[in-house]
Image: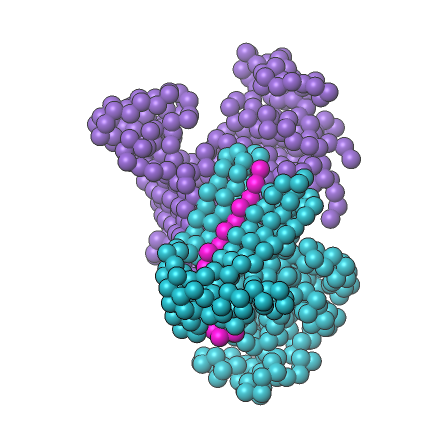
Chain colours: A purple, B cyan
Amino acid sequence: MRNVNVALWGFGAMASGIAKVLLEKEGVTVIGACDIDPKKVGRSIYELLDVDQGERPDAFVTDDIGAIVDKEKCDICVIATDSFTKKVYPKICYAVERGVNVITTAEEMSYPMAQDPELSEAMDILAKTHGVSILGTGINPGLMMDLLAVVLSGCMTHLDKVTCKRVNSLSPFGKLVMEEQGIGLTVDEFNQRVKDGTMAGHVGFAQSVGMIAEAVGWKVDKFEQQMSPIVTDVDRQAPHGFAKAGDVAGVNMTGQGYVDGQVKIDMIHPQQIEPQLGGVATGDYIVLEGSPAVHMANTPEVDGGIGTIGMTVNMLPFVVAAKPGLHTMLTMPVPRCVMGNYAKIAFEEE
Amino acid sequence: MRNVNVALWGFGAMASGIAKVLLEKEGVTVIGACDIDPKKVGRSIYELLDVDQGERPDAFVTDDIGAIVDKEKCDICVIATDSFTKKVYPKICYAVERGVNVITTAEEMSYPMAQDPELSEAMDILAKTHGVSILGTGINPGLMMDLLAVVLSGCMTHLDKVTCKRVNSLSPFGKLVMEEQGIGLTVDEFNQRVKDGTMAGHVGFAQSVGMIAEAVGWKVDKFEQQMSPIVTDVDRQAPHGFAKAGDVAGVNMTGQGYVDGQVKIDMIHPQQIEPQLGGVATGDYIVLEGSPAVHMANTPEVDGGIGTIGMTVNMLPFVVAAKPGLHTMLTMPVPRCVMGNYAKIAFEEE
């Protein structure tokens, strides 16, 4: 059986992390990556990843997507360049029109129906026309604040309310994330950026809420979200960010899905550097009210970067095998750490 | 859209609990139940369940399975009579041959391939021949010590070992379970019953281990399990059982799946009455070693009875909708608490 051939669109931290894991797996070949960074273009991915090429075929970074994304060259394209459906949509169409399956880390693509129903329908039709599949996934959205709550609710006879809380550390992240999340700003500066719409915060609450609601059969009649600064009492120093006492050490995102006028899906996601200095223990928490109640904790939290890499590589062979169309984690087989052969999953008839 | 019509095979604690929950749901009708208990035969299920019949059609307990299980009368049969594949197999065949889908709480049916590969193949062929689906599910096996570990591993790039621990209280259970689990026996009596093979313990480790291994792509080359008495230091009184100090208050089941000569799947399941009197806190715990590690706790544990009822009612409409054949939780959509219309899930084309 031949290997699953994978092209990468983007070769930043996420995509190169995905490539590195794929190189350790059986039955899969990375054929190349597309990136615009002139420091990467033309270089071998093995050299850039500091991985021994061994017997593997050559694979380079190119700035010409047409050189790698085509059904003659690859089975699936990993798109790790954007967070928003509208931004990643043209790239998805490009790959699909060339007969290539797509898996993307774009947060909004985990459940694009929530905010982009027309684009979702267009992608579904296009994928079916070309006989390929599309999936957006990641740790959050994708698992910790949505699919996992859905799965746990499976043991309940009645569900009243879902509360998902993810308390994580931003300390492992780089300068870009520090900037995006406003680490080190004064409270006034933070509030101004929220007002200006230049504070990124977490992307995906609308999608997580939409996924949970569809799964259990609720109709969300209102969705809201809020962003507030996490102000530190003490100086906090992380490898790539610093917040002095009284300034912003992180962002607390909260979101609510209303069903029949009540908050039935409650999302709480404070992200900060050095949370232990604020007396905060990190973790993923899910509380399901109803019968029987579920109180789940995963401590410490699953790291966002490595978790998203994990979800993407593990779902990849299932996207190749899936029936054509736009998928979500609800229409795919359950995620699992694939320790066996990727080609066997991707190509073997049941 | 018409309702999903459900027949129940067995009308004991589990099946009557399932019926009671189904009666609260939309788009589903319980058409009747089959049981051999002369105190139940001929009586209305509404009367037996102490539920107002309202506008619902009559539904009785019969001792003639042919009166309710037929594709003209029902879409799916819930079989809640046995724990073992070999025992439930003739009942499953009976329903399937009459064009009726099957969902069963029989523990071994959650992954019958583990210990009964030939019967599994026979059921798969029979189901496909008759265009219906078969699924075994429950809280354990079915979710807490298998599927949930699989789902959580989805965020990992590498999995070294799975440890599932379920610490639960037997206090809510009745006299039969007290007897099956040896509550109140002396240690000598307990050991004699283990030797005689008359101690039930937990049924399902082989199935849970098989399901996890298939999901992640491991080949189990050896499976072992052990049973030992939980001896209490103090007298323990539960509603339906009593163990005096020095005697048996429960059973500790352990099991191991070996992959390449190493224990890669480790199962620990101590069940006892009044665990708090032994200083034991109950809960469901999953530890996944690898990258990244996962440490999940659900405390207190999901009650086994209500949890199995939940899994069964929630998977029921998906079994009707599934493509024909023998399924496991790995080939079904992710479980979720179905709060919407059952018929919409069972009959609506995607």
Is B179 in front, or is B128? B179
Front in this rendered view, residue A120 or B259: B259
Judge whether residue B166 is colored magenta: yes
Seen at 35% across and 43% down, the residue is A268
When asked about the image quadrant of residue A322, the answer is top right
Q: Is residue A229 visible?
A: no
Q: Is A256 above or below relative to A73?
A: below
Residue A343 position within the rendered picture, expressed as x and y whole percent measured from the top left: 71, 36
Label count reads 0
Q: Is residue A41 left or right of residue B132?
A: left
Does the rendering let one see residue A1?
Answer: yes
Taking the magenta stretch, the answer to whether it contains residue A70 is no
Please, is residue A203 above or below residue B211 in the view?
Answer: above
Observer-nearest of A342 and B249: B249
Residue B140, percent from left and from top: 54, 58
* Screen quadrant of the N terminus of chain B: bottom right
Position of residue A227 measured from the top left corner of the image (x, y, whole percent): 32, 37
Identify the residue at horizontal 55%, vertical 85% (top origin): B40
Taking the spot 58% from the left edge, 68% from the top edge, the residue there is B193
Q: Is residue B23 above or below residue A127?
A: below
Quarter residue B263 falls in: top right
The percent coordinates of residue B181 (x first, y second) are 52, 67
Q: Seen in the image, is A158 located left or right of residue B132?
A: left
- Which residues, given as a range, are shown in magenta? B159-177
Instruction: Say which quadrant the C terminus of chain B sits in.
Output: bottom right
- Residue lying furthest front: B188
> Which residue occupies 68% across, 55% down?
B114
Establish if A271 lies above or below B122.
above
Q: Is residue A175 left or right of residue B314?
A: left
